[in-house]
Image (tube, coloured by chain):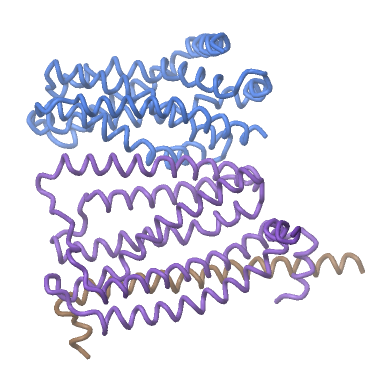
Amino acid sequence: MAEFFHMGGYGLYVWGSFGITALCMIAEPLLLRGRSQSIRKRIARMARVEQEVQQ
Amino acid sequence: MSSRLINWFKFSSPATFYPLARKISVASAVIAVVLIAVGLYMSFFVAPTDYKQGEGYRIIFVHVPASWMSMFIYLVMAAWAAMGLVFNTRLSAMMAQALAPTGAMFAFISLWTGSFWGKPMWGTWWVWDARITSELILLFLYLGYMALRAAIDDPRRGDRASAILLLVGVVNIPIIYYSVQWWNTLHQGSTIKMNAETTMDETMLITMLIMTLGFWAYSIAVAMARVRTVILERERTASWVRELGLAGS
Amino acid sequence: MLEPLYWIIRRDLTIAMRRRADVFTTLIFFVIVVSLFPLGIGPEPETLRQIAPGIVWVGALLASMLALEQIFSADHRDGTLEQMLLTPQPVSVLVVGKILAHWLVSGVPLVIMAPVLGLQYNLSADVLLVLMASLLLGTPALSLIGAIGAALTLGLRSGGVLLALLVLPLYIPVLIFGAGAVEATASGLGGQAHLSMLAAILVASLVLAPLATAAALRVAED
Protein backbone atom coordinates (compact mmCIF):
# COMPACT_ATOMS: atom_id res chain seq x y z
CA MET A 1 0.00 0.00 0.00
CA ALA A 2 2.75 2.42 0.97
CA GLU A 3 4.52 1.38 -2.18
CA PHE A 4 1.46 2.32 -4.20
CA PHE A 5 1.44 5.84 -2.76
CA HIS A 6 5.19 6.11 -3.19
CA MET A 7 4.84 5.62 -6.98
CA GLY A 8 8.45 4.61 -7.40
CA GLY A 9 9.66 7.98 -6.10
CA TYR A 10 7.24 9.99 -8.20
CA GLY A 11 4.55 10.11 -5.49
CA LEU A 12 4.53 13.89 -5.06
CA TYR A 13 4.21 14.50 -8.79
CA VAL A 14 1.66 11.82 -9.59
CA TRP A 15 -0.57 12.59 -6.61
CA GLY A 16 -0.07 16.31 -7.04
CA SER A 17 -1.42 16.02 -10.56
CA PHE A 18 -4.28 13.62 -9.92
CA GLY A 19 -5.14 15.42 -6.69
CA ILE A 20 -5.52 18.85 -8.28
CA THR A 21 -7.47 17.38 -11.18
CA ALA A 22 -9.83 15.63 -8.77
CA LEU A 23 -10.14 18.77 -6.66
CA CYS A 24 -11.08 20.89 -9.69
CA MET A 25 -13.53 18.37 -11.07
CA ILE A 26 -15.26 18.03 -7.69
CA ALA A 27 -15.20 21.73 -6.85
CA GLU A 28 -16.67 22.85 -10.17
CA PRO A 29 -19.99 20.98 -9.83
CA LEU A 30 -20.27 22.07 -6.18
CA LEU A 31 -19.74 25.73 -7.04
CA LEU A 32 -22.23 25.40 -9.85
CA ARG A 33 -24.74 23.89 -7.45
CA GLY A 34 -24.39 26.90 -5.16
CA ARG A 35 -24.94 29.26 -8.07
CA SER A 36 -27.97 27.32 -9.22
CA GLN A 37 -29.49 27.25 -5.74
CA SER A 38 -29.08 30.97 -5.22
CA ILE A 39 -30.90 31.83 -8.46
CA ARG A 40 -33.65 29.30 -7.65
CA LYS A 41 -34.15 30.88 -4.25
CA ARG A 42 -34.28 34.30 -5.81
CA ILE A 43 -36.93 33.23 -8.32
CA ALA A 44 -39.00 31.56 -5.60
CA ARG A 45 -38.76 34.70 -3.47
CA MET A 46 -39.84 36.89 -6.37
CA ALA A 47 -42.82 34.64 -7.03
CA ARG A 48 -43.82 34.73 -3.35
CA VAL A 49 -43.62 38.52 -3.20
CA GLU A 50 -45.69 38.76 -6.35
CA GLN A 51 -48.36 36.50 -4.93
CA GLU A 52 -48.55 38.53 -1.74
CA VAL A 53 -48.92 41.72 -3.71
CA GLN A 54 -51.75 40.23 -5.70
CA GLN A 55 -53.69 39.11 -2.63
CA MET B 1 -41.70 15.30 -43.16
CA SER B 2 -42.24 18.72 -41.70
CA SER B 3 -41.84 17.47 -38.14
CA ARG B 4 -38.28 16.52 -38.98
CA LEU B 5 -37.58 20.06 -39.99
CA ILE B 6 -39.00 21.89 -37.01
CA ASN B 7 -37.58 19.72 -34.25
CA TRP B 8 -34.15 21.32 -34.32
CA PHE B 9 -35.29 24.85 -33.89
CA LYS B 10 -37.82 23.86 -31.29
CA PHE B 11 -34.99 23.10 -28.90
CA SER B 12 -33.28 26.39 -29.58
CA SER B 13 -35.82 28.01 -27.28
CA PRO B 14 -34.55 28.15 -23.70
CA ALA B 15 -37.94 27.14 -22.29
CA THR B 16 -38.07 23.86 -24.19
CA PHE B 17 -34.37 23.17 -23.78
CA TYR B 18 -34.41 23.65 -20.02
CA PRO B 19 -35.97 20.26 -19.10
CA LEU B 20 -34.05 18.47 -21.87
CA ALA B 21 -30.74 19.85 -20.54
CA ARG B 22 -31.43 18.20 -17.20
CA LYS B 23 -31.88 14.80 -18.81
CA ILE B 24 -28.68 15.16 -20.84
CA SER B 25 -26.79 16.40 -17.79
CA VAL B 26 -27.84 13.50 -15.56
CA ALA B 27 -27.14 10.89 -18.23
CA SER B 28 -23.70 12.36 -19.01
CA ALA B 29 -22.85 12.59 -15.33
CA VAL B 30 -23.52 8.87 -14.91
CA ILE B 31 -21.43 8.03 -17.97
CA ALA B 32 -18.65 10.34 -16.75
CA VAL B 33 -18.48 8.72 -13.31
CA VAL B 34 -18.33 5.22 -14.79
CA LEU B 35 -15.74 6.08 -17.45
CA ILE B 36 -13.50 8.04 -15.09
CA ALA B 37 -13.68 5.28 -12.48
CA VAL B 38 -12.67 2.69 -15.07
CA GLY B 39 -10.02 5.06 -16.42
CA LEU B 40 -8.53 5.65 -12.97
CA TYR B 41 -8.45 1.92 -12.23
CA MET B 42 -6.67 1.30 -15.51
CA SER B 43 -4.26 4.21 -14.96
CA PHE B 44 -2.98 2.79 -11.72
CA PHE B 45 -3.48 -0.97 -11.86
CA VAL B 46 -3.64 -2.07 -15.50
CA ALA B 47 -1.29 0.20 -17.42
CA PRO B 48 2.28 -1.10 -17.05
CA THR B 49 5.16 0.89 -15.65
CA ASP B 50 6.99 2.81 -18.36
CA TYR B 51 10.51 1.51 -18.86
CA LYS B 52 11.95 4.99 -19.26
CA GLN B 53 9.88 7.25 -17.03
CA GLY B 54 8.87 4.79 -14.31
CA GLU B 55 5.61 5.49 -12.51
CA GLY B 56 5.85 9.22 -13.19
CA TYR B 57 4.45 8.88 -16.68
CA ARG B 58 0.98 8.09 -15.22
CA ILE B 59 0.42 11.84 -15.09
CA ILE B 60 -0.29 11.80 -18.84
CA PHE B 61 -3.58 10.00 -18.14
CA VAL B 62 -4.94 13.30 -16.85
CA HIS B 63 -2.60 15.69 -18.63
CA VAL B 64 -3.30 14.71 -22.23
CA PRO B 65 -7.10 14.39 -21.90
CA ALA B 66 -7.25 17.75 -20.10
CA SER B 67 -5.19 19.42 -22.86
CA TRP B 68 -7.38 17.92 -25.56
CA MET B 69 -10.56 19.00 -23.82
CA SER B 70 -9.30 22.55 -23.29
CA MET B 71 -8.64 22.94 -27.03
CA PHE B 72 -11.77 21.12 -28.13
CA ILE B 73 -14.05 23.14 -25.86
CA TYR B 74 -12.75 26.41 -27.32
CA LEU B 75 -13.59 25.17 -30.80
CA VAL B 76 -17.07 24.11 -29.69
CA MET B 77 -17.60 27.53 -28.10
CA ALA B 78 -16.57 29.23 -31.33
CA ALA B 79 -18.97 26.99 -33.28
CA TRP B 80 -21.82 27.96 -30.93
CA ALA B 81 -20.83 31.60 -31.27
CA ALA B 82 -20.93 31.40 -35.06
CA MET B 83 -24.30 29.69 -34.91
CA GLY B 84 -25.59 32.36 -32.56
CA LEU B 85 -24.50 35.13 -34.93
CA VAL B 86 -25.94 33.44 -38.01
CA PHE B 87 -29.29 32.19 -36.69
CA ASN B 88 -29.61 34.81 -33.94
CA THR B 89 -30.56 32.21 -31.33
CA ARG B 90 -30.12 33.11 -27.69
CA LEU B 91 -29.45 29.57 -26.62
CA SER B 92 -26.25 29.30 -28.71
CA ALA B 93 -24.62 32.16 -26.83
CA MET B 94 -25.74 30.64 -23.55
CA MET B 95 -24.09 27.35 -24.52
CA ALA B 96 -20.81 29.12 -25.24
CA GLN B 97 -21.10 30.93 -21.92
CA ALA B 98 -21.78 27.68 -20.09
CA LEU B 99 -18.75 25.94 -21.58
CA ALA B 100 -16.15 28.65 -20.88
CA PRO B 101 -15.38 27.98 -17.19
CA THR B 102 -14.99 24.25 -17.83
CA GLY B 103 -12.64 24.91 -20.73
CA ALA B 104 -10.58 27.32 -18.66
CA MET B 105 -10.43 24.76 -15.87
CA PHE B 106 -9.09 22.10 -18.22
CA ALA B 107 -6.50 24.53 -19.56
CA PHE B 108 -5.41 25.19 -15.98
CA ILE B 109 -5.29 21.45 -15.18
CA SER B 110 -3.26 20.88 -18.33
CA LEU B 111 -0.70 23.49 -17.27
CA TRP B 112 -0.59 22.27 -13.67
CA THR B 113 -0.13 18.60 -14.54
CA GLY B 114 2.31 19.49 -17.30
CA SER B 115 4.41 21.30 -14.76
CA PHE B 116 4.20 18.38 -12.31
CA TRP B 117 5.31 16.10 -15.09
CA GLY B 118 8.11 18.38 -16.19
CA LYS B 119 9.70 18.70 -12.76
CA PRO B 120 10.82 15.07 -12.42
CA MET B 121 11.41 14.59 -16.17
CA TRP B 122 13.36 17.74 -17.04
CA GLY B 123 14.16 19.11 -13.60
CA THR B 124 12.22 22.37 -13.90
CA TRP B 125 8.63 23.31 -13.11
CA TRP B 126 8.28 25.40 -16.21
CA VAL B 127 9.73 25.11 -19.70
CA TRP B 128 8.97 27.60 -22.47
CA ASP B 129 8.06 24.75 -24.75
CA ALA B 130 5.83 25.47 -27.75
CA ARG B 131 2.95 23.36 -26.53
CA ILE B 132 3.01 24.62 -22.94
CA THR B 133 3.24 28.23 -24.11
CA SER B 134 0.32 27.76 -26.49
CA GLU B 135 -1.73 26.22 -23.69
CA LEU B 136 -0.95 29.23 -21.51
CA ILE B 137 -2.12 31.57 -24.26
CA LEU B 138 -5.27 29.49 -24.64
CA LEU B 139 -5.93 30.00 -20.93
CA PHE B 140 -5.52 33.77 -21.48
CA LEU B 141 -8.05 33.61 -24.31
CA TYR B 142 -10.54 31.85 -22.03
CA LEU B 143 -10.00 34.44 -19.31
CA GLY B 144 -10.44 37.28 -21.80
CA TYR B 145 -13.71 35.80 -23.01
CA MET B 146 -15.04 35.41 -19.48
CA ALA B 147 -13.90 38.91 -18.49
CA LEU B 148 -15.64 40.47 -21.49
CA ARG B 149 -18.80 38.48 -20.78
CA ALA B 150 -18.77 39.62 -17.16
CA ALA B 151 -18.15 43.28 -18.04
CA ILE B 152 -21.17 43.70 -20.31
CA ASP B 153 -24.45 44.12 -18.46
CA ASP B 154 -26.79 44.00 -21.44
CA PRO B 155 -27.11 40.27 -22.23
CA ARG B 156 -27.82 40.75 -25.95
CA ARG B 157 -24.75 42.91 -26.43
CA GLY B 158 -22.76 40.48 -24.31
CA ASP B 159 -23.84 37.56 -26.49
CA ARG B 160 -22.79 39.16 -29.71
CA ALA B 161 -19.64 40.91 -28.50
CA SER B 162 -18.30 37.73 -26.93
CA ALA B 163 -19.23 35.76 -30.05
CA ILE B 164 -17.12 38.12 -32.15
CA LEU B 165 -14.25 37.73 -29.69
CA LEU B 166 -14.49 33.93 -29.88
CA LEU B 167 -14.39 33.98 -33.68
CA VAL B 168 -11.41 36.36 -33.67
CA GLY B 169 -9.72 34.02 -31.18
CA VAL B 170 -10.35 30.91 -33.22
CA VAL B 171 -8.89 32.53 -36.35
CA ASN B 172 -5.84 33.55 -34.33
CA ILE B 173 -5.17 30.23 -32.61
CA PRO B 174 -3.42 28.58 -35.58
CA ILE B 175 -1.36 31.74 -36.16
CA ILE B 176 -0.41 31.92 -32.50
CA TYR B 177 0.45 28.23 -32.41
CA TYR B 178 2.56 28.49 -35.56
CA SER B 179 4.41 31.59 -34.38
CA VAL B 180 5.11 30.08 -30.96
CA GLN B 181 6.48 26.97 -32.65
CA TRP B 182 8.70 29.08 -34.90
CA TRP B 183 9.91 31.06 -31.89
CA ASN B 184 10.59 27.86 -30.00
CA THR B 185 12.66 26.17 -32.70
CA LEU B 186 14.84 29.28 -33.03
CA HIS B 187 15.59 29.38 -29.31
CA GLN B 188 16.28 25.72 -28.91
CA GLY B 189 19.67 26.41 -27.26
CA SER B 190 19.39 25.16 -23.70
CA THR B 191 15.86 23.78 -23.56
CA ILE B 192 15.10 20.10 -23.57
CA LYS B 193 13.34 18.20 -26.32
CA MET B 194 9.86 17.36 -25.22
CA ASN B 195 9.03 14.37 -27.40
CA ALA B 196 9.03 12.03 -24.44
CA GLU B 197 6.08 10.00 -25.68
CA THR B 198 7.98 7.49 -27.74
CA THR B 199 6.23 4.25 -28.58
CA MET B 200 3.10 3.98 -26.51
CA ASP B 201 1.88 0.74 -25.11
CA GLU B 202 -1.58 -0.24 -26.32
CA THR B 203 -3.11 -0.36 -22.83
CA MET B 204 -1.72 3.11 -22.18
CA LEU B 205 -3.44 4.40 -25.29
CA ILE B 206 -6.75 2.76 -24.37
CA THR B 207 -6.54 4.16 -20.84
CA MET B 208 -5.94 7.63 -22.20
CA LEU B 209 -8.88 7.25 -24.55
CA ILE B 210 -11.20 6.14 -21.75
CA MET B 211 -10.12 9.08 -19.60
CA THR B 212 -10.68 11.44 -22.52
CA LEU B 213 -14.21 10.10 -23.06
CA GLY B 214 -14.82 10.42 -19.33
CA PHE B 215 -13.67 14.07 -19.35
CA TRP B 216 -15.84 14.61 -22.37
CA ALA B 217 -18.93 13.28 -20.61
CA TYR B 218 -18.02 15.34 -17.55
CA SER B 219 -17.82 18.49 -19.67
CA ILE B 220 -21.23 17.83 -21.21
CA ALA B 221 -22.76 17.15 -17.79
CA VAL B 222 -21.35 20.33 -16.24
CA ALA B 223 -22.08 22.50 -19.27
CA MET B 224 -25.69 21.33 -19.39
CA ALA B 225 -26.12 21.95 -15.68
CA ARG B 226 -24.58 25.40 -16.09
CA VAL B 227 -26.68 26.31 -19.10
CA ARG B 228 -29.74 25.59 -16.95
CA THR B 229 -28.48 28.05 -14.37
CA VAL B 230 -27.68 30.62 -17.04
CA ILE B 231 -31.17 30.21 -18.50
CA LEU B 232 -32.73 30.77 -15.09
CA GLU B 233 -30.56 33.81 -14.42
CA ARG B 234 -31.37 35.42 -17.71
CA GLU B 235 -35.02 34.44 -18.04
CA ARG B 236 -35.95 34.96 -14.41
CA THR B 237 -38.79 37.33 -15.30
CA ALA B 238 -40.27 35.07 -18.00
CA SER B 239 -43.60 33.51 -17.14
CA TRP B 240 -42.47 29.92 -17.66
CA VAL B 241 -39.69 30.42 -15.14
CA ARG B 242 -42.11 31.87 -12.59
CA GLU B 243 -44.19 28.76 -12.82
CA LEU B 244 -41.06 26.70 -12.15
CA GLY B 245 -40.08 28.95 -9.27
CA LEU B 246 -43.31 28.27 -7.47
CA ALA B 247 -42.85 24.54 -7.75
CA GLY B 248 -39.09 24.42 -7.14
CA SER B 249 -37.23 24.58 -3.87
CA MET C 1 -14.72 54.26 -51.78
CA LEU C 2 -11.45 56.11 -51.43
CA GLU C 3 -13.05 59.47 -50.88
CA PRO C 4 -14.70 58.69 -47.53
CA LEU C 5 -11.44 57.07 -46.48
CA TYR C 6 -9.57 60.26 -47.27
CA TRP C 7 -12.06 62.41 -45.39
CA ILE C 8 -12.11 60.23 -42.32
CA ILE C 9 -8.32 60.27 -42.12
CA ARG C 10 -8.19 64.01 -42.66
CA ARG C 11 -10.84 64.65 -40.04
CA ASP C 12 -9.22 62.42 -37.43
CA LEU C 13 -5.79 63.91 -38.06
CA THR C 14 -7.16 67.42 -37.65
CA ILE C 15 -8.74 66.47 -34.35
CA ALA C 16 -5.56 64.75 -33.21
CA MET C 17 -3.48 67.83 -34.07
CA ARG C 18 -5.69 69.86 -31.76
CA ARG C 19 -4.91 67.46 -28.94
CA ARG C 20 -1.21 67.03 -29.45
CA ALA C 21 -0.63 66.16 -25.81
CA ASP C 22 -2.13 62.68 -26.37
CA VAL C 23 0.45 61.90 -29.02
CA PHE C 24 3.29 62.85 -26.72
CA THR C 25 1.88 60.86 -23.81
CA THR C 26 2.14 57.62 -25.80
CA LEU C 27 5.62 58.48 -26.98
CA ILE C 28 6.90 59.44 -23.55
CA PHE C 29 5.46 56.26 -22.08
CA PHE C 30 7.41 54.27 -24.69
CA VAL C 31 10.65 56.10 -23.88
CA ILE C 32 10.25 55.68 -20.12
CA VAL C 33 9.37 51.97 -20.24
CA VAL C 34 12.32 51.14 -22.48
CA SER C 35 14.66 53.23 -20.32
CA LEU C 36 13.53 51.49 -17.15
CA PHE C 37 14.94 48.11 -18.13
CA PRO C 38 18.66 48.95 -17.88
CA LEU C 39 17.93 50.31 -14.40
CA GLY C 40 16.35 47.04 -13.42
CA ILE C 41 18.81 44.74 -15.13
CA GLY C 42 22.13 46.57 -14.85
CA PRO C 43 24.26 48.51 -17.33
CA GLU C 44 26.22 45.52 -18.72
CA PRO C 45 26.39 46.41 -22.48
CA GLU C 46 26.52 42.82 -23.71
CA THR C 47 23.41 41.76 -21.77
CA LEU C 48 21.55 44.88 -22.87
CA ARG C 49 22.39 44.31 -26.51
CA GLN C 50 21.03 40.79 -26.22
CA ILE C 51 17.69 41.76 -24.71
CA ALA C 52 17.21 45.03 -26.63
CA PRO C 53 14.95 43.67 -29.43
CA GLY C 54 12.50 42.19 -26.97
CA ILE C 55 12.45 45.24 -24.73
CA VAL C 56 11.96 47.81 -27.48
CA TRP C 57 9.26 45.67 -29.03
CA VAL C 58 7.40 45.04 -25.78
CA GLY C 59 7.63 48.75 -25.02
CA ALA C 60 6.19 49.67 -28.42
CA LEU C 61 3.47 47.05 -28.00
CA LEU C 62 2.41 48.38 -24.61
CA ALA C 63 2.52 51.98 -25.77
CA SER C 64 0.36 51.32 -28.81
CA MET C 65 -2.03 49.30 -26.64
CA LEU C 66 -2.42 52.22 -24.25
CA ALA C 67 -3.36 54.47 -27.14
CA LEU C 68 -6.00 52.06 -28.45
CA GLU C 69 -8.84 53.26 -26.29
CA GLN C 70 -8.77 56.64 -28.03
CA ILE C 71 -9.59 55.21 -31.47
CA PHE C 72 -13.36 55.23 -30.94
CA SER C 73 -14.03 56.56 -27.45
CA ALA C 74 -14.37 60.29 -28.23
CA ASP C 75 -16.62 59.65 -31.25
CA HIS C 76 -18.65 57.21 -29.20
CA ARG C 77 -19.16 59.71 -26.38
CA ASP C 78 -20.44 62.58 -28.52
CA GLY C 79 -22.55 60.36 -30.79
CA THR C 80 -20.52 60.88 -33.97
CA LEU C 81 -19.85 57.18 -34.26
CA GLU C 82 -23.54 56.38 -34.29
CA GLN C 83 -24.03 58.81 -37.16
CA MET C 84 -21.09 57.33 -39.04
CA LEU C 85 -22.63 53.87 -38.83
CA LEU C 86 -25.81 55.27 -40.40
CA THR C 87 -24.02 56.64 -43.48
CA PRO C 88 -24.28 54.63 -46.72
CA GLN C 89 -20.51 54.03 -46.82
CA PRO C 90 -19.41 50.52 -45.78
CA VAL C 91 -18.51 50.58 -42.10
CA SER C 92 -15.27 48.68 -42.61
CA VAL C 93 -13.95 51.47 -44.85
CA LEU C 94 -14.66 54.02 -42.13
CA VAL C 95 -12.95 51.70 -39.66
CA VAL C 96 -9.86 51.39 -41.85
CA GLY C 97 -9.71 55.17 -42.09
CA LYS C 98 -9.97 55.66 -38.36
CA ILE C 99 -7.35 53.01 -37.65
CA LEU C 100 -4.98 54.43 -40.25
CA ALA C 101 -5.32 57.92 -38.79
CA HIS C 102 -4.79 56.52 -35.33
CA TRP C 103 -1.67 54.68 -36.45
CA LEU C 104 -0.25 57.82 -38.09
CA VAL C 105 -0.65 59.62 -34.80
CA SER C 106 0.34 56.94 -32.29
CA GLY C 107 2.32 54.33 -34.26
CA VAL C 108 4.57 56.37 -36.53
CA PRO C 109 6.13 58.35 -33.65
CA LEU C 110 7.10 55.04 -32.07
CA VAL C 111 8.78 53.92 -35.29
CA ILE C 112 10.74 57.18 -35.46
CA MET C 113 11.71 57.09 -31.80
CA ALA C 114 12.79 53.44 -31.75
CA PRO C 115 16.30 53.88 -33.26
CA VAL C 116 17.11 56.54 -30.66
CA LEU C 117 16.19 54.10 -27.94
CA GLY C 118 18.11 51.38 -29.75
CA LEU C 119 21.25 53.50 -29.41
CA GLN C 120 20.83 53.31 -25.63
CA TYR C 121 21.26 49.58 -26.05
CA ASN C 122 24.32 49.76 -28.32
CA LEU C 123 22.57 48.38 -31.39
CA SER C 124 24.48 48.71 -34.65
CA ALA C 125 23.19 50.67 -37.65
CA ASP C 126 21.88 47.74 -39.71
CA VAL C 127 20.09 46.31 -36.67
CA LEU C 128 18.49 49.69 -36.05
CA LEU C 129 17.29 49.73 -39.63
CA VAL C 130 15.66 46.33 -39.25
CA LEU C 131 14.16 47.47 -35.96
CA MET C 132 12.52 50.36 -37.75
CA ALA C 133 11.35 48.18 -40.61
CA SER C 134 9.86 45.62 -38.23
CA LEU C 135 8.03 48.33 -36.29
CA LEU C 136 6.85 49.90 -39.53
CA LEU C 137 5.24 46.60 -40.51
CA GLY C 138 4.23 45.56 -37.01
CA THR C 139 2.65 48.63 -35.43
CA PRO C 140 -0.13 48.99 -38.05
CA ALA C 141 -0.95 45.32 -37.49
CA LEU C 142 -1.11 46.02 -33.75
CA SER C 143 -3.48 48.94 -34.37
CA LEU C 144 -5.69 46.84 -36.63
CA ILE C 145 -5.92 43.92 -34.20
CA GLY C 146 -6.27 46.23 -31.24
CA ALA C 147 -9.15 48.10 -32.86
CA ILE C 148 -11.26 44.94 -32.53
CA GLY C 149 -10.70 44.98 -28.79
CA ALA C 150 -11.32 48.73 -28.60
CA ALA C 151 -14.65 48.29 -30.40
CA LEU C 152 -15.68 45.36 -28.21
CA THR C 153 -14.98 47.21 -24.96
CA LEU C 154 -16.46 50.52 -26.11
CA GLY C 155 -18.17 52.31 -23.23
CA LEU C 156 -17.64 49.54 -20.67
CA ARG C 157 -16.82 50.31 -17.06
CA SER C 158 -13.54 48.39 -16.85
CA GLY C 159 -12.58 49.33 -20.43
CA GLY C 160 -8.82 49.86 -20.18
CA VAL C 161 -7.74 46.77 -18.28
CA LEU C 162 -10.24 44.59 -20.09
CA LEU C 163 -8.93 45.82 -23.42
CA ALA C 164 -5.41 44.77 -22.42
CA LEU C 165 -6.65 41.34 -21.40
CA LEU C 166 -8.42 40.80 -24.73
CA VAL C 167 -5.76 42.21 -27.01
CA LEU C 168 -2.42 41.11 -25.54
CA PRO C 169 -2.81 37.38 -26.35
CA LEU C 170 -3.65 38.31 -29.94
CA TYR C 171 -0.50 40.47 -30.15
CA ILE C 172 1.81 37.53 -29.52
CA PRO C 173 2.52 36.58 -33.17
CA VAL C 174 3.40 40.18 -34.05
CA LEU C 175 5.72 40.37 -31.05
CA ILE C 176 7.42 37.09 -31.90
CA PHE C 177 8.14 37.98 -35.52
CA GLY C 178 8.92 41.63 -34.80
CA ALA C 179 11.43 41.04 -32.04
CA GLY C 180 12.62 37.93 -33.89
CA ALA C 181 13.52 39.95 -37.00
CA VAL C 182 15.70 42.30 -34.99
CA GLU C 183 17.33 39.52 -33.06
CA ALA C 184 18.01 37.43 -36.15
CA THR C 185 19.71 40.41 -37.78
CA ALA C 186 21.75 41.09 -34.66
CA SER C 187 22.96 37.50 -34.52
CA GLY C 188 23.84 37.54 -38.23
CA LEU C 189 21.10 35.18 -39.43
CA GLY C 190 19.19 37.85 -41.33
CA GLY C 191 15.65 38.93 -40.51
CA GLN C 192 14.22 38.53 -44.00
CA ALA C 193 11.93 35.61 -43.18
CA HIS C 194 10.60 37.30 -40.06
CA LEU C 195 9.85 40.49 -41.95
CA SER C 196 7.97 38.55 -44.62
CA MET C 197 5.88 36.90 -41.91
CA LEU C 198 5.18 40.31 -40.38
CA ALA C 199 4.07 41.60 -43.77
CA ALA C 200 1.80 38.58 -44.16
CA ILE C 201 0.25 39.23 -40.75
CA LEU C 202 -0.24 42.88 -41.68
CA VAL C 203 -2.02 41.98 -44.92
CA ALA C 204 -4.20 39.37 -43.21
CA SER C 205 -5.19 41.75 -40.43
CA LEU C 206 -5.84 44.52 -42.96
CA VAL C 207 -8.37 42.23 -44.63
CA LEU C 208 -9.98 40.61 -41.59
CA ALA C 209 -9.69 43.01 -38.67
CA PRO C 210 -11.84 45.84 -40.14
CA LEU C 211 -14.68 43.38 -40.71
CA ALA C 212 -14.56 42.18 -37.10
CA THR C 213 -14.20 45.76 -35.85
CA ALA C 214 -17.17 46.92 -37.90
CA ALA C 215 -19.29 44.06 -36.54
CA ALA C 216 -18.19 44.88 -32.98
CA LEU C 217 -19.00 48.58 -33.46
CA ARG C 218 -22.50 47.74 -34.67
CA VAL C 219 -23.00 45.60 -31.57
CA ALA C 220 -21.70 48.33 -29.29
CA GLU C 221 -23.82 51.11 -30.84
CA ASP C 222 -26.99 49.06 -31.04
Chain letter for the brown part: A
**Rendering colour (chain B):** purple
Q: Residue furthest front?
A: B1
Q: Residue C84's spot in the image, x, y percent?
A: 64, 20
Question: Is the residue A8 above or below the residue C135 in the image?
Answer: below
User: Seen in the image, is B247 located left or right of residue B101?
Assistant: right
Q: Is residue B240 left or right of residue B72?
A: right
Determine which quarter of the picture holds residue B53: bottom left
Q: Name the residue at 76% across, 75% down.
A: B247
- Report which quarter residue C50 is drawn in: top left
Residue C126 appears left or right of C93: left
Name the residue at 14% across, 60% down: B122
Give the residue furthest to the right: A55
Q: In the shown orientation, is residue A48 left or right of residue C19?
A: right
Residue located at (15% from left, 37% from top):
C41
Residue B152 location, x and y as percent?
Answer: 59, 45
| Colour blue maps to chain | C
Placement of C91 over or under B122, stated as above or below:
above
- Quadrant location of residue B213? bottom left
Indicate the position of residue B75 as horizontal and vertical percent values.
46, 52
